Amino acid sequence: MLDFCILISSLFCSSALFLYNFHILKKEEIRMKIAISAESTIDLPKEQLERFDIHTLPFTLNLGSKSVLDGEIRPEDLFKFTEETGQLPKTSAVNEFQYREHFKKLKEEGYDAIIHFCLSSGISSAWSNARKVKDEFENLYIIDTKSLSTGIALLAIQARKLADEGKKPEEIYAISSERVKNVQASFSLESVNYLYKGGRCSMLARLGANLLHLKPEIFVHTDTGKRSAGQKFRGSRRKVVRNYVEDTLKQFNHPDLSLCFITYSTAPDDVVEAVKKRLYERGFKEVIPTHAGGTISCHCGPHCLGILYINDGK
């Protein structure tokens, strides 16, 4: 009788262990493999894309008769082209065919779902083009970030972390979409000359700004995703950047302190380091400097610098 009880007890324990292991395996099986994706306008270097496991596809830059992919040319070379020709490089958004091939490749790599973060629909046709192929793929989520540059990166990085925590793609989509309205994306410019060349500034405004030595700020409206002028500063470039940073931190004063980007086309090392130091003093846990890609550089010109963070902290 004792042996029989021991046998029953052993069988019960084995069954319980089997059910527990089966539950764990099923839980692992149902966790979806999720790709986080964006265009090259996310303005992250290769090492950061790899660190956060973000997939990208490039915009195209047209320099006269020559075309190059965004990320394959330095901002300095773009500015040199403009100085020599008087023309701005033109940017071409990712087209429908390129999106289809990009999403198809991710699916072939075994991803169950894709969450793609688009450059603002108020700036580019990228979101519209991506939407055209959405219904061709199962579990493809397209987000209009209403932002640009590393403002997009802030949302994509958060999405990657949520995916790694086991969140479902629809949950990640909902959380990311909700945070769009809180992305603070702005830049301090050296001049309005590139805005004028790109048709985003009138001749009268350009003359007035140059005459008064005004250094404008541009920011992105998160309701429309369009850019507009903000504060105008005077003084040396270092003074202007310092005032721009202080004004931004004062105006958008509830930052999520986990991460902030310093994104610039060109800037002296000591200016970038001074901004970085100030942001750490403000309490940011991580501050990442990055070079602006072709889109920001073409539109804003040399010596453009911005700080970007999500303004929904407590």
Image (cartoon, rainbow, N blue to C red):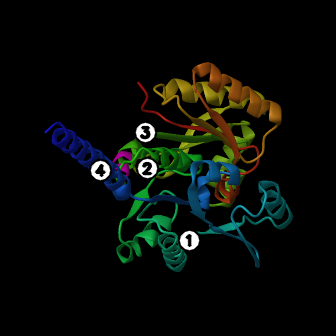
Q: Nearer the viewer, mark 3 or mark 4?
A: 4
Q: Name the residue tied to disc 3.
A: 182
Residue 18's disc number: 4
Q: Of marks 3 and 4, which one's residue comes earlier in the chain?
A: 4
Tell me which residue sits at (38%, 73%) in the image. Answer: 137
Q: Is residue 103 left or right of residue 277?
A: left
Amino acid bearing label 1: Val
Marks 3 and 1 sit apart, C-alpha to C-alpha, by 26 Å
Determine the main secondary structure of the stretch shown in magenta.
helix
Q: Nearer the viewer, mark 4 or mark 2?
A: 4
Classify 10 Å Cα crowding around label 2: few (below 14), some (14-19), many (20 and above). Answer: many
Classify 10 Å Cα crowding around label 4: few (below 14), some (14-19), many (20 and above). Answer: few
Q: Nearer the viewer, mark 3 or mark 2?
A: 2
Quadrant in which the N terminus is drawn? top left
Amino acid bearing label 4: Phe
Q: Name the residue tied to disc 1.
A: 94
Q: Which residues are magenta?
A: 170-175
Circle 4: element type: helix
Amino acid bearing label 2: Ala
Percent across and percent down for residue 200 are 59, 56
Circle 3: element type: helix
Q: Name the residue tied to disc 2.
A: 163
